[in-house]
Amino acid sequence: MSNTLVAGLDLGSTGVKILVADDAGAEVLIRQLPTPWRAGAAGTTTMEAADLVATVRELIELVDADLRELRGQDVRIGAVAVSGMGESGVILDADGEPVAPAIAWFDPRGGEQVHALPTSIREEFAGRTGLPLGVQVSVIKMLHLRDDGLDLTGARWLNLPEFVVAALGGEQAAEYSLSSRTGLLDQDTGAPWPELLAHLGVGEDFLPPFVDAGTLLGEASVDWLPASFEGARLTVAGHDHLVSAVSNGEFPDDRYHVSMGTAEVLLRVLDAPLPFEARDRLADWLINCVRHVVPGKWVLVAGVKTGLLMRRTLQLVGVNDRAGRDALDAAVMEQPYEGVLQPGDVEVTGARNDDGVLRLVVQADGAGPADLFGAVLRHGNDELSLLVEAMDREVPPARSALLTGGWASMRSVQRARSEVLAGVRVSDRSQDTAYGAAVFAARLLTPDAATVGASADPSR
């Protein structure tokens, strides 16, 4: 049995996870800590770079102790790949030091910056970047920080997974799928959008060199690493939902990958990008057409904030642990999908990807926790149906769906999504993204692994 293992690190919206796998791809252990967000007024949410590094360090030290107990003192992590959420990142100064906290992708600030964009940028934004224009896009957060007084002279942006790789001792690099979330990447050229860079007041070096997911970016060398992680090869695996989609090997083009975390994402794989006009039409429905973690592939990404609404519903009804969630799940399943109250007795809004505010209107007596949660599930289905219809107008309909993520294990969630998606099945992995990152890490140990810092062809 080899004592050289690989690790996949997933920087999630709720938790930071590490999954360790052996050379046969079998999971050895999984550890998780809460994502160190700092909540502010009116939904504002930030994270200090030092807090993120401290969380990663604590996880690595926990894993090191566990592995030594499981595998002995000579255990070694040969490679680490980092995946995670998009739209959130760290701005570094010329010395490589963070100069502002990371702003959460779901932070509501930036409306003034959206409205202040030049008309030419506003009109071209969706078709050029593949993203709907809104406060979720990273460049809007950058503009907010700039307008709040942050000097961007000589600064550089790193998405969170890219920042963690650099913090472990790796090279700074801009991975394509994460860069696609910033709004700075032209989907047709694969290069930064000059007009938007100029509006931001930065040059092309504001982003580091572009690389494909899985490119070797050096070795772990920071002085606080335990011996088991020292010298591990490093890479950025890419945007979490996309990494999750490749965790089970080849993913059919006619399947929805449904990643159910704080955001619920429907993902379709494409062999080529849709044209400018189609990207513009899809953006009206808040649907993205961006680059995949697989070179030469693109993805349609449609999101809703159903996980956020479900989490807040659980909190509202006093469910704060797995046992309580399981009991509520069973109670929902005792009811028919449509529920037992009259139509309109409980109304829910907030799942749209540009919303996220849970609004419950209860117009009758007798509404209990199961009624509320069931209504949230049906509201999620209503929003997903609109997204599916919009995608079906641009690409052939999907014939199956794979549910992954923390909410996918609930029977009531599985039943609900089967109402609007064909051929639903549930992943048997508990952490698809972290496992997918571990797959990228394992590739770094193969004889044909990429050379350090190899840049990809921007026109791919």
Image: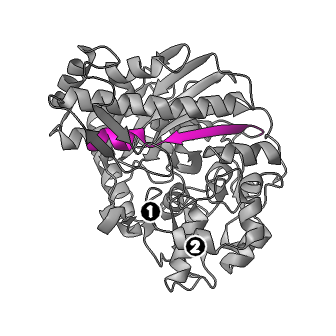
| Mark 2: amino acid | Gln
| Residue 84: image location, x then y, percent | 49, 48
Name the residue carrying label 2.
113
Is there any visible trace of residue 367 in the rendered image? Answer: yes
Residue drawn where x is 18% and y is 30% of the image: 367
Closer to us: 387 or 15: 387
Closer to us: 293 or 437: 293
Secondary-structure class at tag 2: helix
Residue 108: assigned label: 1
Residue drawn where x is 30% and y is 68% of the image: 41
User: Magenta stretch containing residue 335, yes or no?
Assistant: no
| Residue 151: image location, x then y, percent | 56, 86
* Magenta residues (range): 296-312
Q: Would you call the spot at circle 2 few (<14 residues within 10 Å), some (14-19), or many (20 or more)?
A: some
Secondary-structure class at tag 1: loop
| Residue 131: image location, x then y, percent | 66, 52
Above or below, 310 against 174 in this view is above
Q: Is residue 88 left or right of residue 42?
A: right
Closer to us: 349 or 118: 349
| Residue 392: image location, x then y, percent | 69, 27
